[in-house]
Image (tube, rainbow, N blue to C red):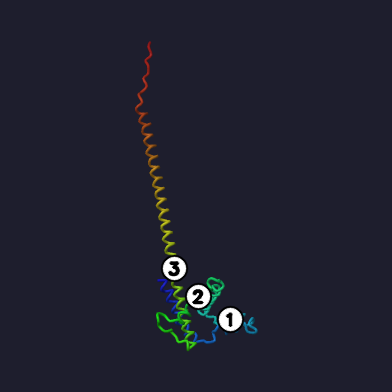
Amino acid sequence: SNSNSHTKDVFLGLSGVKQIEKKDLVLTSKNQTERLTRPSSSYFNLNPFEVLQIDQIKTSFRQAQKAFEAVDKAYKLLLDQEQKKRALDVIQAGKEYVEHTKEGKPTIVEEGDPELFKQAIYKQTMKLFAQEAKEMHERKRQREEETEAQEKAKREREWQKNFEESRDGRVDSWRNFQANTKGKKEKKNRTFLRPPKVKMEQRE
């Protein structure tokens, strides 16, 4: 289903994050910001392929476009204070999940290793975001199904109403036709039954 496919895509993306981080450590937000705002950046940034760090191959361009759309979406979400608060709440929930015990069990990662602790929070946070995305997608699907069912019921009611009105119209037309036909027959019969005129004989 679309919901399962959506969730699968989310978790596939999460599984690839660690590999991407190992593959290219220079792709950090700080380094990218410095690269795009360095001296003479206005000159270097004239080349859109240089800005996006891609070649002219169409596949790379499509991937860069998808990446830009993701960045643009995230930026716009954070401009919305309600959406920003929601994201911060999810991050806080992920942190609290890792920090505290669950059902009497010890913490998932010992706080003695800050890096592992940070990674555990990151992974748990991503799981919560994925779970929330799945739930939102499911709610959207249910709303669409409800809307579709309501529209279908409305169309059926309109069809039934039009059918009944059309049927009533056909019945009225048939009755009028029968009444007119009956009236013509009676008039015609009266004409045939009229007695012939008798001429009076003249006397000589």
Q: Which of the numbered marks, if any, corresponds to residue 51?
A: 1
SS at mark 2 in the image: helix
How many numbered discs?
A: 3
Q: Rate crowding at label 2 as few (under 14), some (14 to 19) or many (20 or more) other CA atoms within 10 Å.
A: few
Q: Earlier in the sequence, mark 3 or mark 2?
A: 2
Q: Which of the numbered marks, if any, corresponds to residue 89?
A: 2
Q: Which of the numbered marks, if any, corresponds to residue 139?
A: 3
Quadrant location, the N terminus: bottom left
**Where residue 204 sits in the image (x, y, percent)?**
38, 10
Q: Nearer the viewer, mark 3 or mark 2?
A: 2
Q: Can you tell which quarter of the image residue 50 is in?
A: bottom right
**Where residue 38 sits in the image (x, y, percent)?**
63, 84
Extreme-top residue of the structure: 204
Q: Earlier in the sequence, mark 2 or mark 1?
A: 1
**Where residue 113 sits in the image (x, y, percent)?**
48, 89
Separation of marks 2 and 1 at Cα, in angstroms: 33 Å
SS at mark 1 in the image: helix
* Amino acid marked by disc 3: Arg
Q: Rate crowding at label 3 as few (under 14), some (14 to 19) or many (20 or more) other CA atoms within 10 Å.
A: few
**Where residue 174 sits in the image (x, y, percent)?**
38, 42
* Amino acid marked by disc 1: Val
User: Which residue lies at the image location 60% right of the left edge and 82% below the top edge?
Assistant: 36
CB of mark 3 within 8 Å of CB of mark 1?
no
User: Which residue lies at the image location 46% right of the left edge and 83% below the top edge?
Assistant: 120
Question: Left of 168 or right of it: where is 23?
Answer: right
Q: Earlier in the sequence, mark 3 or mark 1?
A: 1
